[in-house]
Image (cartoon, rainbow, N blue to C red):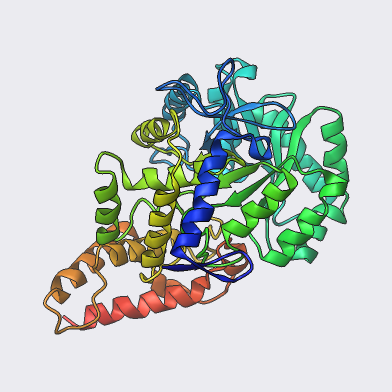
Amino acid sequence: MEDNDMDGNSITRREFLKHAGAAAAALGAMASGCAPVKEGGVPGQEKPGEMTLRTNPASGDKVSLLGYGCMRWPMTEDGTVDQEAVNRLVDRAIESGVNYFDTAPVYCRGLSEKMTAAALSRHPRNSYFIATKLSNFSNWSKDNSVLMYRKSFENLMTDHIDYYLLHSVSGGTDKFNSRFMDNGMVDFLMKEREAGRIRNLGFSFHDDKECFDYVLSLHDKVHWDFVQIQLNYLDWKHPSAGPDAAYLYGELEKRGIPAVIMEPLLGGRLSKVPEHIAARLKGMEPQNSVASWAFRFAGTFPGVLTVLSGMTYMEHLEENIRTYSPLAPLDAEELAFLEETATLMKQYPTIPCNNCEYCMPCPYGIDIPSILLHYNKCVNEGNIATDTSDSGYRKARRAYLVGYDRAVPKIRQADHCIGCRKCVSMCPQKINIPWELHRIARYVENLKLQK
């Protein structure tokens, strides 16, 4: 096996193991000020059943390594959040030691902040950290941005926000400056931090290397307290778009900036891998899930403050609690095994959709995420039918078409896309969504014709 280092130089498997071993060994140290720490205990030595905590080097916050992403709260049939279910999930999370809750004004159709606050307010304010964002995507005037910021305090029923982010830095440096710099919002938020209404100021990132380097170059002026990046064992060296996670993490680590991790499962794609990949992972650890490998990978790096997971169901929460209570960091051999796994996965032509729903709503009512996710599901299950002479063609054809109609109402399917491209600029993964929808529409039409 060969891989590339951050400068693009080829390295051998032996060299990779050497570097991976160094990373694994660093977990017991206070690298970047973010080594696992337990109150009254030895760093990295949690008791069985205890949630692993990481220390924010600037504030001293003891943050749970498992963070709760509040973008996918359970919804009722009428499209509202199921508050009772949210309460149960939050109660169990806090009981297990989870104390970081990440929301935004735009999550859950604009309901997430209020519903998260309704659940959290039943617990002492000092028992959890709230993270929310400046989601000024369509109107970034200062007046509107400040209004959104103040509305978050009202929605969250709090007098301070523990972790505040510039939401989804994307679209290049000019757009970043327009959304946050030229309108004076960064200066405003820095003053809010000085006043104590914001305790930590950072940004979430979905763009290219040039933009990342530019925003980090502002560190001397802004002093970023944390940065939220996409990191998982596929994006570590094999991203579908933008710089690899190894580069992003490495640049933060150089500056001692804690990393908050999003998309450890790539929108679920690393829990729904091709069958032979799943068998490979289960063969190494039969007692653990496929998803646990991805969560262990994300938590292994000592500069990671918390790993976000949007846990809609109690079984997902319980599984992730087990993975991080406490974390068993990956060793050098396991890191190398996951790199080999990532290389194998790149051979499968899945669409890099993370189900973030930033592309929604489509002005023509198309259910973009469901269409793309159904296609990926069929790729992983071997149900992409291309050759009519193949012995499995009829089975794969039926699986795709029946599953497609069940997953997506016909009026919201790919053939209704007119190519307006409104969705393209919103996609953090830089997917050419209209092209993919038209390709899928042609594929479905061919399946219907070739009976």
Which quarter of the image is occupied by the C terminus? bottom left
Query: In front: 363, or 17?
Result: 17
Q: Looking at the picture, how far across and down is residue 34, in whole percent?
A: 63, 35
Q: How many marks?
A: 0
Is residue 8 visible to us here?
Answer: yes
Residue occupying image coordinates x 59% and y 71% = 9
Left or right of 59 in this view: 442 = left
Residue occupying image coordinates x 42% and y 41% = 78
| Residue, far left | 391
Residue 120 sits above or below residue 220 on the image: above
Query: In front: 282, or 15?
Result: 15
Q: Looking at the picture, how far across and down is residue 439, in whole percent?
A: 40, 78
Which quarter of the image is occupied by the N terminus? bottom left
Left or right of 30 in this view: 340 = left
Residue occupying image coordinates x 30% and y 63% = 380
Residue occupying image coordinates x 53% and y 29% = 44
Query: In front: 433, or 216?
Result: 216
Left or right of 374 in this view: 240 = right
Is residue 411 visible to us here?
Answer: no
Q: Looking at the picture, how far across and down is residue 181, in whole percent?
A: 85, 54
Q: Looking at the picture, how far across and down is residue 67, in whole percent?
A: 53, 35
Residue 402 sits above or below residue 68 on the image: below
Residue 353 sits above or below residue 43 on the image: below
Left or right of 93 in this view: 228 = right
Residue 64 sits above or below residue 15 on the image: above
Where on the picture, by quarter, is residue 342?
A: bottom left
